[in-house]
Image (cartoon, rainbow, N blue to C red):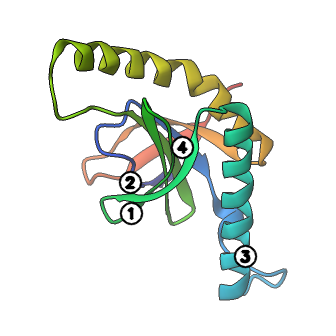
Amino acid sequence: MGRSVDYLNNADLVLYFNGDFLSGLDEDGEYCQDMAELNWEDFYSELKHNIKAKLKSYNECEKWDSNEVSIFLENELAEIGLSEYCGLCSLSVRAKDDEFYNSYEKVKEGIAKHHVKQIEKSLVKCLENVGVEVLNRLGTMSNGIGVFEKANA
């Protein structure tokens, strides 16, 4: 699989997954806009519900990081964003960094980065629970296209 998808700027964790099921193709292989929107909304709602059930400190929010990444959950330490491009999706997490760099904020930033590492397995499990295939990024070709393979459990 060779595609590229955006993720949060300065992300501390990026999980890629195959979102071809979101394509909106009917049983005849014809594209249906209504089906694509319904598939995405169902997936998005279920993923958000699963993450909030597993990681109780996260609250819903509606923010954008660039034009392609929707930040949909956050807590005091981190933000979780979702992006999709041509059937390839990314779920990314970034530790929040405050603009004030006193000693407390530097400690908080370290705690936030540690928190992101701690929630990785929970996020993978949430993705698997909504029926998606988590992918490993193998590398990037010279034209910027990423190359992925199915992640081993």
Q: CA distance from mark 2 to mark 4?
A: 10 Å
Q: Quadrant of residue 26?
A: bottom right
Of the numbered discs 1 and 3, the one sitting upstream in the chain is: 3
Amino acid marked by disc 3? Leu
What residue would you read off at disc 2? 6
Q: Which is more foreground, mark 2 or mark 1?
A: 1
Give percent across and percent down for residue 115: 48, 20
Q: Relative to 147, is 44 above or below? A: below
Q: Which is more foreground, mark 4 or mark 3?
A: 3
Residue drawn 75% across the image and 54% down it: 46
Which residue reaches farthest right?
27
Q: Secondary structure at mark 1?
A: loop
Q: CA distance from mark 1 to mark 3?
A: 19 Å
Amino acid marked by disc 4? Tyr
User: Do the residues bearing badges 2 and 3 touch, measured as CB atoms within 8 Å?
Assistant: no
Of the numbered discs 2 and 1, the one sitting upstream in the chain is: 2
What residue would you read off at disc 4? 16
What residue would you read off at disc 3? 38
Q: Secondary structure at mark 4?
A: strand
Q: Residues within 10 Å of mark 3 (few under 14, many from 20)?
A: few
Q: CA distance from mark 4 to mark 3?
A: 21 Å
Residue 129 horizontal side relative to residue 83, left or right = right
Residue 21 horizontal side relative to residue 88, left or right = right
Amino acid marked by disc 1? Glu
Give percent across and percent down for residue 12: 38, 30
User: Do the residues bearing badges 4 and 1 touch, measured as CB atoms within 8 Å?
Assistant: no
Tag of residue 68? 1
